[in-house]
Amino acid sequence: MRYNLLAVAILLSVCSCKNTDKEVEKSNPKLKEQTQPQITNVNFDEGDSRGALIPAYHQTFERNLNRINFEDSLYSLYQAVGLKEMNLDYEPFRYAMIGFYNLKQDGLLNTKDLISIIDFTQTSTEKRFYTIDLAKKKVLFNTLVSHGRTTGGNKSSVFSNKSGSNASSLGFYLTAETYVGSKGYSMRLDGLDKGYNDQMRKRAVVMHNAKYVSDDWIKKYGRLGRSQGCPALPVEISKKVIDVIKDRTVIFAYYKDDGYLKSSKYLNLEKLMQKLESQHKALTSI
């Protein structure tokens, strides 16, 4: 009898808690929204139609971006990926993501939700190349990358879009097709920023491997070897990186250059907000 009374008391307590929760939600509607579980990636077997009904994490993240939450949401993503611990400051990541969303809205990118960043404010001896899987909130690659001969010694400082300059170029690159050439397995790049990198294909600036991009080279010379403007990668990882990011993903080559940062159309935040608002209206009207 004593146990039956105890069970009844517990049942009444649970019901009371549920009713209290409903009353709190009525008095504060925002609380209900805040306590809803976040949508995350759900893996289904290939061909399972349920997968189409549940958006991937980053698709949902992008759809929920607006003027009010943009900066906070982006910084939360930066923290979740763990980029600070990998020596990538928030500023290059923020600029890269503004460009990523603008490019995606323009239909220039594939559906992989990958972004690569070269942080030219870091020295050549640092692992300043990052490839990030935004859907999985994970860094896929963090490795060394070269800069051009005239861009600097260990530090980068000079950038160019001119043929014969042997310099690296700033801005957004679109990855293109692969081929095997004099530098081995390589990938062509198309510069998207007019006046800053749109001559890359004409200059034959490509991604390839190089023996001078290695820890051994750093130990011997105190810096990496330099290219003719190509972002060269270590021999042991180059092919793997290229195969993951080829065919219309974006690479953002960052340097604190006010002229570029203020003029690139892909870094126009107001333009991006207008696009996201239009997208949101279109989705909610369906």
Image (cartoon, rainbow, N blue to C red):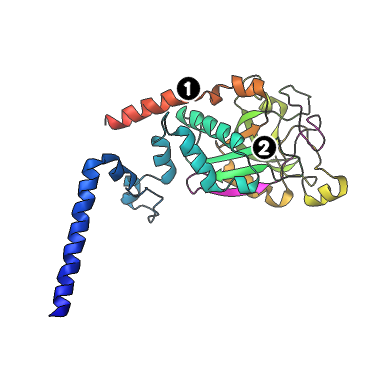
Splitting the image into 4 quarters, where does residue 44 fall? bottom left
Residue displayed at 80% across by 45% down: 212
> Quick one: SS at disc 1?
helix
Q: Is residue 141 magenta?
A: yes
Instruction: Give the x, y percent position of residue 76.
Output: 49, 42
Which of 99/183 is in front? 99
Residue 278, placed above or below residue 61: above
* Horizontal side, residue 272 vs residue 31: left or right: right
Which of 96/162 is in front? 96
The residue furthest bottom is: 1
- Which stretch appears magenta? 133-159
- Identified by mark 2, the residue type is Asp
Decide: few, some or many residues near mark 2? Use Cα within 10 Å; few <14, some 14-19, many ≥20: many
Q: Is residue 33 magenta?
A: no
Would residue 25 be visible to someone looking at this image?
yes
Residue 98, placed above or below residue 32: above
The residue that label 2 is drawn on is 119
* Circle nearer the N terminus (1, 2): 2
Residue displayed at 82% across by 47% down: 218
* Horizontal side, residue 198 vs residue 182: left or right: left
- Identified by mark 1, the residue type is Glu
Decide: few, some or many residues near mark 1? Use Cα within 10 Å; few <14, some 14-19, many ≥20: few
Numbered-mark total: 2
Instruction: Give the x, y percent position of residue 21.
Output: 23, 51
Image quadrant holding the C terminus, namely top left
Residue 104, placed above or below residue 131: above
Q: CA distance from mark 1 to mark 2?
A: 24 Å
The residue that label 1 is drawn on is 270
Residue displayed at 17% across by 72% down: 7
Image quadrant holding the N terminus, namely bottom left
